[in-house]
Amino acid sequence: MEAAPNTDALDQQFKEFIQALKKAVGTGIPHLKDDPKVVDQAIADCKEILDVVMEGNVKEWIS
Amino acid sequence: MFTEKVDLKDFEKQDPEYQDLLRRVLSIQADCEIGGPNLYVKDILPNAPTKLDQLIVARTAAEEMDHYRKIAKLAGDIGVDVSFVLSRPNKDRYVEAFRGEIKTWEDFAVFGFLIDRVGRFQLEEFIGCTYLPLARVVEDPDMIREEEGHIDFGVNASAEWAAKGGETKERIQKAVNYWYVKGLDMFGNSKSYRSERYMYWGLKRRTNAEARALYKEEIDGLLKKMDLEIPDPNKGRLYT
């Protein structure tokens, strides 16, 4: 069975997006009460990653 | 009734109907998994009530992205490229519930409560299914556990708002009225021929009508506990 083009590349790219997003969330949550700057940066990082994913420009990601 | 277990290496040897149904269900599932974040990330991530809520929205999106990734890999391995759904406008989504935008926190809460619950029902359909790579993905504890986390968050947030009464409760009721019928419709037509064929090939466990009835029983019980009205299940429905 021949896989669809870019199956593995897309899978790898998504793993990286997800890992980065979870890392940002994990950085922000422990500091909700003591460090608003860290939390704000974590939220900004999440937004930046999600903006790229929601745009869905697959060709650009895996070129 | 087809009861064999099929692995990737044997996929091409299967009946064309089996192949078509599997391609179809994986394409729809991938579209739905990424369809959720596309509904709420844009407006809810920046506007969630608290910073914790903002981070929960991001985590929820990350988990749905991971579900998309797993389904897209299964689809890709059998030759189906579902990357196009990543840039598809919401209005073109396979399932009607994913064709709009979520702009309010109460809609986000009720979406988790009602629509992610349909997602859990759909994933449960594949437990023990004849296509082993799909069965393995949904039987791994992560996927359904994460979906349950989204549902619990939605239930708790909806219940909390309902308990406040007054205008806050009215807003949750309005969101319930909107999503309730969309959730019921997500199970498809009760007289669907395709639904029977999915069962014949061991790709799903229940008919659309059976799954919908179980879902309705579950959500009606929760709505009663929240002292919210159960909307008319026939009003505005696309499929019965």
Image: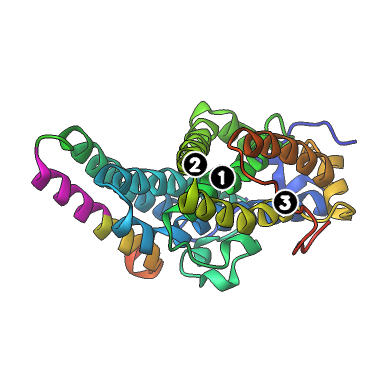
Q: Are marks 3 and 1 on the same chain?
A: yes
Amino acid type, label 3: Leu
Q: Earlier in the sequence, mark 3 or mark 2?
A: 2
Q: Answer whether labels 1 and 2 touch (C-beta < 8 Å).
A: yes
- The verdict on a common chain for dots 1 and 2 is yes
Q: Is residue A57 above or below residue B203?
A: below
Q: Which residue is pictured at 86% across the width and 36% down the height?
A: B2
> Please, is residue A48 above or below residue B211 in the view?
below
Reading the chain from its start, which is encountered first: label 1 or label 2? 1
The subunit letter for the residue under badge 2 reads: B
- In this figure, which residue is indicated by the disc labeled 3? B184
Instruction: Determine which quarter of the picture holds residue A38.
Output: top left
Give the magenta-colored segment's residue range. Answer: A35-46
Label 2: which secondary element: helix
C-alpha gap between disc 3 and disc 2: 17 Å
Label 1 packing within 10 angstroms: few (<14), some (14-19), many (20+) = many
Q: Residue at x 15, y 35 (%)?
A: A33
Figure disc tally:
3
Amino acid type, callout 1: Asp
Q: Which residue is mark 1?
A: B116
Residue B156, horizontal then vertical, whole percent: 47, 36
Q: Secondary structure at mark 1?
A: helix
Describe residue A47's horizontal placement relative to residue B121 as left or right: left
Task: Tell me, for residue B154, which label it has, or none.
Answer: 2
Would you say the residues marked 3 and 2 are in contact, meaning their CB atoms lie under 8 Å apart? Answer: no
Q: Residues within 10 Å of mark 2 (few under 14, many from 20)?
A: many
